[in-house]
Image (cartoon, rainbow, N blue to C red):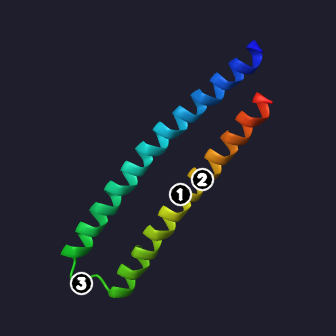
Amino acid sequence: MEQNQFLKQIIDFNRASFNNTYDMLVMVQDQAERMTSSFLSQASWFPDEGRNMIAEWIKACKKGQEDMKKNIDSNLKKAEEFFSA
């Protein structure tokens, strides 16, 4: 019983560490997006194709970020269920 509780604490620690790191990375990505948007709004010489490419790139990064979060959360939940059984 003690061993399962110890493993649960390790999983909880890993979850908290991941969530804190993830939140920090989201803040960094959001700041980079704001800086890019500010640059593009001031750069009238920048072509529309480039603007569209950057917008698609930002969407892809956000989707990858969300998918990674879902996968990590799912795997941590599976590990928790495995060790609690």
**Proximity of marks 3 and 1: CB atoms separated by less than 8 Å:** no
- The amino acid sitting under disc 3 is Trp
- Front-most of 46 and 17? 17
Question: In the image, residue 40 lies at what x, y percent?
Answer: 26, 74
| For marks 3 and 1 on the same chain, the one whose residue lies earlier in the sequence | 3
| Quadrant (top left/top right/bottom left/bottom right) for the N terminus | top right
- Distance in Å between CA atoms under marks 3 and 1: 33 Å
| Relative image position of residue 46 (x, y in whole percent) | 28, 82
Q: 10 Å neighbourhood of mark 2: few (<14), some, or many (≥20)?
A: few
Between 49 and 17, the one nearer to me in the picture: 17
Under circle 1, the secondary element is: helix
Q: Which quadrant would residue 53 be assigned to in this image? A: bottom left
Q: How crowded is mark 3: few (under 14 residues within 10 Å), some or many (20 or more)?
A: few
Residue 45 circle label: 3
Q: Quadrant of residue 29?
A: bottom left
Residue 43: x, y in percent? 22, 77
Question: Mark on residue 70?
Answer: 2
Rounded to the nearest whole Å, what is the CA distance between mark 2 and mark 3?
Answer: 39 Å
The residue pinned by badge 1 equals 66
Residue drawn 63% across the image and 22% down it: 9
| Mark 1 and mark 2 residues within 8 Å of each other at the beta carbon | yes
The type of residue carrying mark 1 is: Glu
Residue 47 lies, in percent from the top left, at 32, 86
Nearer to us of marks 2 and 3 is 2
**Figure quadrant of residue 15:** top right
Task: Return the residue found at the far top.
Answer: 2
